[in-house]
Structures are given as structure tokens and as C-alpha cells.
Amino acid sequence: MNSAIKFFGILFFVMFAFISCNNSPTLQEYYVTSKENDAFISVDLPANILQLKNNEVSEDVKQTLASIKKVNFLALQLTDSNEALYTSEKLKVKAILKNPKYKQLMRMNLGKGAVSVNYLGEEDAIDEVVLFGSDNNKGFAVVRVLGENMNPAEIMKMAQEIELDGDSEQLKQLGGLINGLK
């Protein structure tokens, strides 16, 4: 009888482990995989690229800036030769963002394109903000702002007080890539 209880206990644990495993891809996995594809443009920006315009800001703004750890940028420029890739990759990103763990903050329809802002975490303690924008003439971009306990209201305040380190090599690279998309 003891061995039967152990058997069913182990069986229950194995079933629970399989049921609780989520096989749907994460945005992190998608980002890493896509970075390896030459069709994509990707840039990782460290948080130290963000600087305050004025050091005389509130402690809240300084703490908010400190809560940001990294920014990832991934884009796929639409060309005549990659329309099928664009369509399939855009659907993959949309499917990932439909996962209930991503909560939507905002969505705008812009005619030929759309922009959505999603996040992971709690409303007052966000760990990741995801901006996804697509334009059916130009392509799409995914921007991930990674941090720890970020507050969206404070991030909006901070955005008005921030400037980018113009001498940064990563920023120069990103600027060149964005200009190439125009």
C-alpha cells in the first residue's frame, strides 16, 4: 500500500509539472532568436545611456531612473522581398503579447499601423514595459524596457526629465538604424 501511495504521489507530481509548464514562447526567447536573424535590427541599450537633463529633480525621478536596467530594441524593416516574413513575425509577437501575463496599458490604431504598450508585473511595480509598433508600409519594432519595480506614472514624469547620452556608441548605432528605416 505504501508503494502505491508513493507511485500515485510521483505520478501526481509529474502530471502537475507537465500541466504547469508553459510551452508558449516568451518575448525574451523571441528577442534572442530574432537577434540571430540578419533580417532583424537589434540594439541593447544599458541604463547608463539614460541621463537626467537637470540634476535638481525629485528623489522619485532619480529612483525611477535607477529602476530601469536595460532597453532592448528589435525591428524588422518591411521590404518587397520579406513580406511573408514580416507577416509571420508580426503574428508571432502579437501572439506572445496576448498571453495573459502581459497586461495592456494602451493601444492605438493608426490606420496602416498600430502601437501597443504592455507590461509584466503589478501596476505599481512593473518589471518590463513592452512597446510594439507596426506599420504595414515600413515594418515593426519591439522595445523592451527592463527594470525592477518600475512605476508607470513615475516613468512618465521621468521621461520629461531625461536625455540620452549622445556620445554613446549604442545610441549612435540606434540612430543610424532608425534613419535607415525612414
Image (cartoon, rainbow, N blue to C red):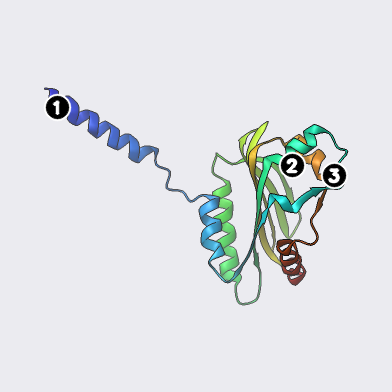
Q: Which of the 4 image quadrants contains residue 181?
A: bottom right
Residues at circles 2 and 3 in contact by the CB criterion of under 8 Å:
no
Closer to us: 42 or 84: 42
124 shown above or below 128 = above
Q: Which residue: 18% across, 31% down?
A: 7
Q: Quadrant of the N terminus?
A: top left
Under mark 2, the amino acid is Leu
Foreground mark, 1 or 3, reads 3
Which residue position is annotated with label 3?
160
Foreground mark, 2 or 3, reads 2
**SS at circle 1:** helix
Farthest residue, direction top: 1
Is residue 109 in sight in this rendering? yes
Q: CA distance from mark 1 to mark 3?
A: 65 Å
Under mark 1, the amino acid is Ala
Near mark 3 (Cα within 10 A), the count class, few <14, some 14-19 or many ≥20, is: few
Q: Give how far across and how far down residue 51 sits, in percent.
A: 79, 49
- Of pointers 1 and 3, the one earlier in the residue sequence: 1
Q: Which residue: 66% across, 74% down?
A: 79
Which residue position is annotated with label 1?
4
Near mark 1 (Cα within 10 A), the count class, few <14, some 14-19 or many ≥20, is: few
- Of pointers 2 and 3, the one earlier in the residue sequence: 2
- Of pointers 2 and 1, the one earlier in the residue sequence: 1
Farthest residue, direction bottom: 81
Q: Quadrant of the C terminus?
A: bottom right
Q: CA distance from mark 2 to mark 3?
A: 12 Å
Under mark 3, the amino acid is Gln
Which residue position is annotated with label 2?
65
Numbered label tally: 3
